[in-house]
Image: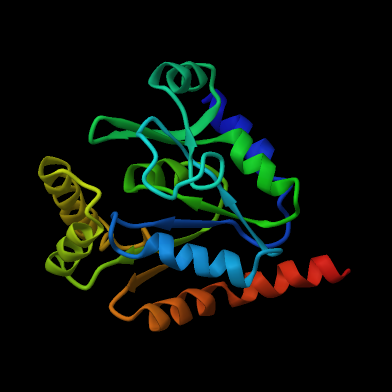
Amino acid sequence: MRWRRFLCRALSVMTGPRPVVLSGPSGAGKSTLLKKLLKDYENVFGFSVSHTTRQPRPGEVNGKDYHFVSREEMQKQIDAGGFIENAEFSGNMYGTSKAAIQAVQAQNQICILDIDMQGVKNIKKTDLNPIYISVQAPSIEVLEKRLRDRQTESEDSLQKRLNAARIDMELSKEPGLFDLIIINNDLEEAYTELKNILAEEIQKAQGSKKS
């Protein structure tokens, strides 16, 4: 597959620390954990900024949280082979571009990919060899409360997210799919788990910057 060969060549330059694939349903706390990681290790990790056709939420910044683009623009880039993975959810398109990964690599940082379950399985078909981490809520009830507390979803959109989360929670249990499943019941404990599994890669990255 053409895009796969390109991906392997583009990412083979990353001979030091392994990239990180972070996955999990909306409301599980994945974004909060990711922001803490990037704040504490801002010169070590680089976030691969995904593309989406959905509208920005309050406080979200284009180019930082997502690349917010039109459906026509995103489809054009997908057709041109510019994405390593893409999917559609709740009527909106999401995806990870090759350029977003290369931008992180250019900074000699560990690349973090925030990807849904379909994207995880697509990455599994490549030679990227990242650390796969799933972040899950303790229960679907807790997840629903978190989503409702946001007050950013319509009832229809919320139900779609809950249905997707149920599927995500079940699929995450597939043997060998993830290196670590973090049940985010307590944010600090979850963050400690995340740092522990990444400790070796963090050390590699910090060492390479010192040298």
Q: Is residue 124 above or below residue 170?
A: above
Name the residue at 44% across, 79% down: 193
Q: Is residue 176 above or below residue 111?
A: below
Q: Nearer the viewer, residue 36 or 120?
A: 36
Question: Residue 173 at x, y = what percent?
Answer: 25, 63
6 left or right, relative to 24: right
Question: Residue 205 at x, y = what percent?
Answer: 72, 67
Q: How many marks?
A: 0
Name the residue at 59% across, 34% down: 98
Question: Residue 143 at x, y = what percent?
Answer: 20, 64
Q: Residue 200's quadrant in the figure?
A: bottom right
Name the residue at 36% across, 58% down: 177
Question: Residue 54 at x, y = what percent?
Answer: 35, 34
Quadrant for the C terminus, please. bottom right
90 left or right, relative to 44: left
In this picture the colour scheme is: rainbow
Q: Residue 171's quadrant in the figure?
A: bottom left
